Amino acid sequence: MGNLQWVDSSGGPLVLISDKSAEFWSGILKRSAYLAKIKEDVEDFLDPNETDYGKACMINNYLGLVKVQNEDVLVIADEPLSTSFFFVSEKPVLARWIYGEDKASVNYFLLNIELDLIENWHFEFIIDFFSDKQFLFDSVNSFDKKIKQYLEINIKKGCYKIFTSLFEPDDKTKLVLHKFEIES
């Protein structure tokens, strides 16, 4: 599997959004103007009625959902932690780095993880992906493929239950894990 790629935020939440809706994410720009292809600042970029970033900042848990173009967008909130994505036995997993000695040791733990041995999973909610391609990026930004400050993710379309767990493989490493299980 090799080394994992990580994405960071500038202090706010990250979003996981489909390739079909990514172009409609306004970040801190005025949503109504952005949808009309006009870049316009707002007085209060935290206002959820004005910006998509404002909607994302309303999430007070590890994860939450907002809508863009009638599609679920996963908000990865709580704290601005480095975040990676990978598969374990075909299950999609998001990992958020709380602390760890270095990237090599954190990557090692994640690349050798056995999800079934982790006992403290709790159910968050169900998300429906309408596309096989998603992007993970800082919610403050509007999406732009040219900037390359995102991870491209390929979760097969379908309904997924999301579970969260704190993972401490040793006394020097702590991560938040979010696993996605397809609904049957």
Image: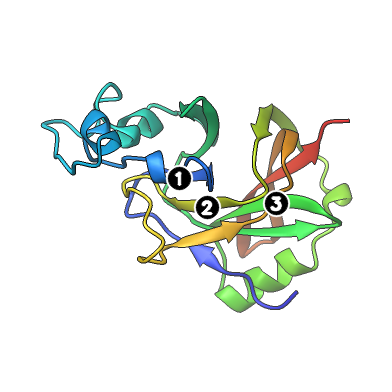
Please tell me whether mark 2 or mark 1 is closer to you in this view: 1
For the residue pair 166 and 59, the one nearer the viewer reads as 59
Give residue 96's position: percent from left, percent from top: 57, 53
Q: Residue drawn at (69%, 55%), measured in percent from left and top?
A: 168
What amino acid is labelled 1 in the image?
Answer: Ala
Residue on which disc 2 sits: 135
Q: Which mark sits nearer the N-terminus, 3 or 2?
A: 3
Between marks 2 and 1, how big is the CA–CA gap? 7 Å
Residue on which disc 3 sits: 93
Q: In which quarter of the image is residue 87?
A: bottom right
Residue on which disc 1 sits: 22
Secondary structure, mark 3, is strand
Is residue 105 shown left or right of residue 72? Answer: right
What amino acid is labelled 2 in the image?
Answer: Phe
Secondary structure, mark 2, is strand
44 to 164, vertically: above or below? above
For the residue pair 39 and 49, the one nearer the viewer reads as 39
13 to 1, vertically: above or below? above
Image marks 2 and 1: residues in contact by CB distance under 8 Å: yes
Please tell me whether mark 1 or mark 3 is closer to you in this view: 1
Is residue 71 shown left or right of residue 47? Answer: right
Q: Quadrant of residue 56?
A: top left
Tag of residue 7: none
Between marks 1 and 3, how big is the CA–CA gap? 20 Å
Image marks 1 and 3: residues in contact by CB distance under 8 Å: no
Secondary structure, mark 1, is helix
Is residue 23 shown left or right of residue 20? Answer: left
Q: Which mark sits nearer the N-terminus, 1 or 3?
A: 1
